[in-house]
Image: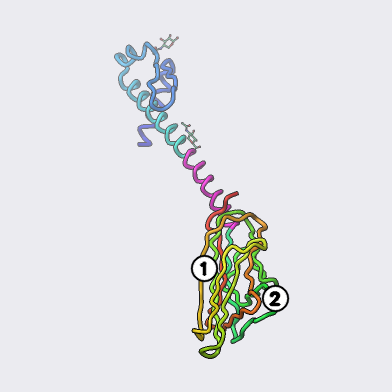
Amino acid sequence: MRGIVFLCLLGCSLAQNLTYSWNGPGTSSQGDPNAANECLTDTQTCGCCLMQKQMWRMETFFNMSLAELQRGLERAQGVLNTMRSSRSAFSVALTDTRRCVGPNRADVVVQYQSVFINLGDGYSVSTGVFTVPRSGVYALALTVYSDAGAVGVLLAACGRMRRNGRVIAALNEYNTQDQEDSATVVLAVQMQAGDKVDVILPATCYLCDDNSHYNTFSGFLLYATD
Ligand SMILES: *[C@@H]1O[C@H](CO)[C@@H](O)[C@H](O)[C@H]1NC(C)=O
Ligand SMILES: *[C@@H]1O[C@H](CO)[C@@H](O)[C@H](O)[C@H]1NC(C)=O
């Protein structure tokens, strides 16, 4: 293949009078009107030149295709980098050692202390609040559990998930029929960067947990919208 190209280059340099115009891939180029006559007198040189012309056309086509692929790759890498830099996921449990929180006389924010994951550092252990790092659609989940200690005692496993102080979902297991009970809610919510999500333990309710992690609060970014 390389030998043919060299031969062509040699052949064409000897036939400088033959000129071809380039009209891009897929279009026919107008050659020298004398080319036909040329081919009658010097078929070898002419054939070589036509071949070189085709190869140049192919090379240009491949160069253009390659450039297009490279642009596509750069775009995809840009999107991937944005996705990586905006990853956000938290999942926390109430405690690692056996403990109950509540009942309190007023509503309090639950401070989940056992952290499974806090990608992007959106969740604060000291406040119990998740601050949305990036606008987008988030999945949020809350599970509450409590243990009354004995049958017939008031069981009050409750929780209210709030966004910017407004309740978006509530769980309420308030009865004297069960010693233990749990409830779960899962949501998909469109949120803005800076929004604050927390869980309220209503007055008179109480949650119990140990290293089985019966009480969990989780959220993660499904996709960004900015
Ligand atoms: C190339 O061009 C020159 C001058 O235009 C002419 O004298 C010569 O005959 C041409 N050669 C061929 C191979 O056509
Ligand atoms: C194709 O690309 C190579 C490398 O950039 C370059 O050397 C060559 O001249 C290009 N060929 C054409 C026909 O544009």
Could you tell me the amino acid type at mark 1?
Val
The residue labelled by disc 2 is 106
Could you tell me the amino acid type at mark 2?
Ala
Residue at 59% x, 87% y is 98
Residue at 49% x, 84% y is 178
The residue labelled by disc 1 is 185
Q: State yes or no: Cβ of the residue under disc 2 lies below 8 Å from any atom of ligand 2.
A: no
The segment highlighted magenta reads 67-86
Label 2, residues with CA under 10 Å away: few <14, some 14-19, many ≥20: few
The colouring scheme, among rainbow, by chain, secondary structure or one colour, is: rainbow
Looking at the image, in which quadrant does ligand 1 appear?
top left
**Picture coordinates of residue 71 (x, y %)?**
51, 41
Is residue 6 at all visible to an observer of this figure?
no
Residue at disc 2, secondary structure:
loop
Callouts 1 and 2 close, C-beta under 8 Å: no
**Picture coordinates of residue 166 (x, y %)?**
64, 62
- In the displayed structure, 83 sits above or below 159; it is above
Left or right of 2 on screen, residue 93:
right
- In the displayed structure, 36 sits above or below 25; it is above
Quarter holding residue 48: top left
User: Does the magenta-highlighted stretch encompass residue 80?
Assistant: yes
Left or right of 175 on screen, residue 12:
left
Left or right of 14 on screen, residue 39:
left
